[in-house]
Image (tube, grey):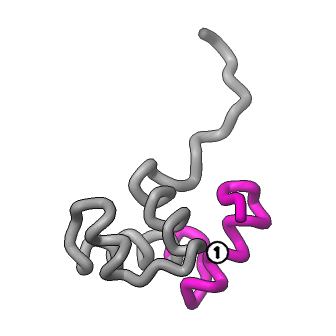
């Protein structure tokens, strides 16, 4: 193993799944149903990501994730 230069991913797998659906114009309810989690959990994932990025809204989070190469649209 040794010196892996790849940084730890910014998003958890679940956060990534939520945002991949978000960029497809899915609602919180759609995402919750598709991932078999509650709407509250979806909102928690979104707000966790917004906190990590230091942004104020979902769309800003998406823009920042794309800029960082964490999300493709």
Q: How many marks?
A: 1
Q: Position of residue 36 (x, y in %)?
A: 23, 61
- Which of 55 and 22 lies nearest the eye of the viewer? 22
In the drawing, does residue 35 fall left or right of residue 58? left
Q: Residue at x 31, y 81 (%)?
A: 29
Identify the residue at the far top of this view.
Answer: 1
Q: Residue at x 37, y 71 (%)?
A: 31
In the drawing, does residue 52 fall left or right of residue 62? left
Question: Which residue matches tag 1?
Answer: 62
Q: Position of residue 44 (x, y in %)?
A: 33, 75
27 versus 15 height, above or below: below
- Which of 53 and 39 lies nearest the eye of the viewer? 39
Q: Is residue 45 magenta?
A: no
Task: Give the image quarter of residue 24.
Answer: bottom right
Q: Position of residue 54 (x, y in %)?
A: 60, 78
Q: Residue at x 47, y 78 (%)?
A: 26
In the drawing, does residue 19 fall left or right of residue 67? left
In the drawing, does residue 56 fall left or right of residue 40? right
* Within-10-Å neighbours for mark 1: few <14, some 14–19, many 20+: many
Quadrant in which the N terminus appears: top right
Identify the residue at the far right of this view.
Answer: 67
39 versus 4 height, above or below: below
Task: Give the image quarter of residue 69.
Answer: bottom right
Q: Residue at x 54, y 63 (%)?
A: 20
Q: Is residue 62 magenta?
A: yes
Q: Which residues are magenta?
A: 51-73
Q: Position of residue 21 (x, y in %)?
A: 50, 67
Circle 1: element type: helix
């Amino acid at each position: 193993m040794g010196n892996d230069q790849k940084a730890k991913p910014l998003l958890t797998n679940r956060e990534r799944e939520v945002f991949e659906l978000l960029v497809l114009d899915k609602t919180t309810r759609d995402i919750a149903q598709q991932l078999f989690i509650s709407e509250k959990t979806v909102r928690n994932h979104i707000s966790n990501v917004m906190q990590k990025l230091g942004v104020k809204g979902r769309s800003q989070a998406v823009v920042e994730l794309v800029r960082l190469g964490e999300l493709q649209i």
